[in-house]
Image (cartoon, helix red, strand yellow):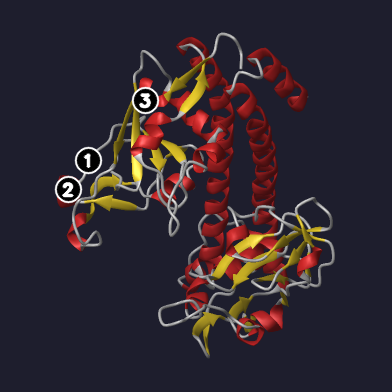
Amino acid sequence: MSSDWQLVKLSALGTFDRGKSKHRPRDAKHLYGGAYPFIQTGDITSAGGRIISYRQTYSEAGLAQSKLWPSKTLCITIAANIAETALLTFPACFPDSVVGFTVDPQKADVRFVEYLFRAFRDSVKRRAYGSAQENINLEVLRDLAFPVPGLQEQIIIADFLTLFDDRISLLRENNATLEAIAQALFKSWFVDFDPVRAKAEGLEPEGMDAATTALFPDSFEESGIGLVPRGWKCSTVGQSFILTMGQSPPGDTYNESGEGLSFYQGRTDFGFRFPTQRIFCSAPTRLAEAGDTLVSVRAPVGDVNIALEPCALGRGVASVRHPHGHQSFVFYSVRSLKTHFELYDGEGTVFGSINKKDFQALPVFLPGESLLEAFEGLVAPLDAGIENNERRLRALTQLRDTLLPRLISGQLRLPEAEAMVEEVDA
């Protein structure tokens, strides 16, 4: 630790207060569905340091038995996945499984404190107690001490690290936009049949050139599943795609050293679009190729991703591939099977799963090859952009996480960190 850094208790930099959710039972319907964001532990864990979205809201009754915390409050989980942190970017409520930390602006930069928690999260977790479910209380948090520089240096370091988070957030936003465009096009063409409906009414499909318009029929015909575009084939996953169900290789072939192929076992390995790498397998038995669509087939069923690289498939994962490529069409087709997957993972199931026979029987539409090629021509570049952004995002995340603990503890000075970033950018 640098000589101008001091070991400081967090309680000297601000105040900790526990979230509030007084009403019992907590799932009372009248508490929810209003205008007040209600942040839960899962929202914090997945936020990447900044809470910019939420899944639940409180009503006026919910707010009355809780508290609205201001923007820039540091949220800290104290149960389940403890010591996960993120900053509010808007006023919000949260339950008593979350602690709010409000900094004294004359003593600390709240972003710096959040980075402190990221850097020292493992040591904070070791302070947890309890056997059934680990948790950590306010007294422990107030007693935590970290190496801290003066306020101006905190701001400078936080500004530097925030640049990483800004770039990462922008890449994620770009990916969400690209995927929304691709998803909307697939839905218009292959779910809502908008071009076919337009032609059936004697209209030109909106925003479509003449060559692409000519690829769509101008009428529908009856099928076993209702009206479908004339000439399109009502097929199944097994008839149209190549399905490979995963299989667990011997346990002694698993490793974390990077030997062999990335090994995916189910939903817990999945992130946005591309699964995250956690374990390797030196003797895989079932393989997926780069670009294959990956699907979780056990508890829960139907999470869908794409293989960023060749990988090994564990028992909880299957891969789907088109015999002639068309990777984007396969991905969005499998995504569109969500309601079918839910039948194998719904209420009443002890352990959700779908077997190969049932998976192969799931329905898909198969238009002509020319139309598939037209779709790929429009969507494949969007998917390639998402993949490129994902690779950049992972490189930035790795560099940030390498620099973070050294910067935040005073072991690495900012000019040295900036030089390392320049080398990577070069």
Is disc 1 surrounded by few (<14), some (14 to 19) or many (20+) residues within 10 Å? some
Three-letter code for the amino acid on which mark 1 is drawn: Lys
Q: Quadrant of residue 103?
A: top left
Along the horizontal axis of the image, is 375 left or right of 159?
right
Q: Secondary structure at mark 3?
A: helix
Residue 65: which numbered mark, if any?
A: 2
* Residue labelled with disc 3: 11
Asked whether disc 2 touches disc 1, contact meaning CB atoms under 8 Å apart, the reply is no
Along the horizontal axis of the image, is 217 left or right of 155?
right
The residue lying at 62 percent from left, 58 percent from top is 269
Q: Quadrant of residue 87?
A: top left
Real-space CA distance between mark 2 and mark 3, rounded to the nearest whole angstrom: 26 Å
Please tell me which residue lies in front, 368 or 156.
156
If the image is split into quadrants, where does the C terminus sit? top right
Residue 260 in the image, given as x and y percentages of width and height: 84, 58
Residue 323 in the image, given as x and y percentages of width and height: 78, 73
Q: Secondary structure at mark 1?
A: loop
Three-letter code for the amino acid on which mark 2 is drawn: Gln
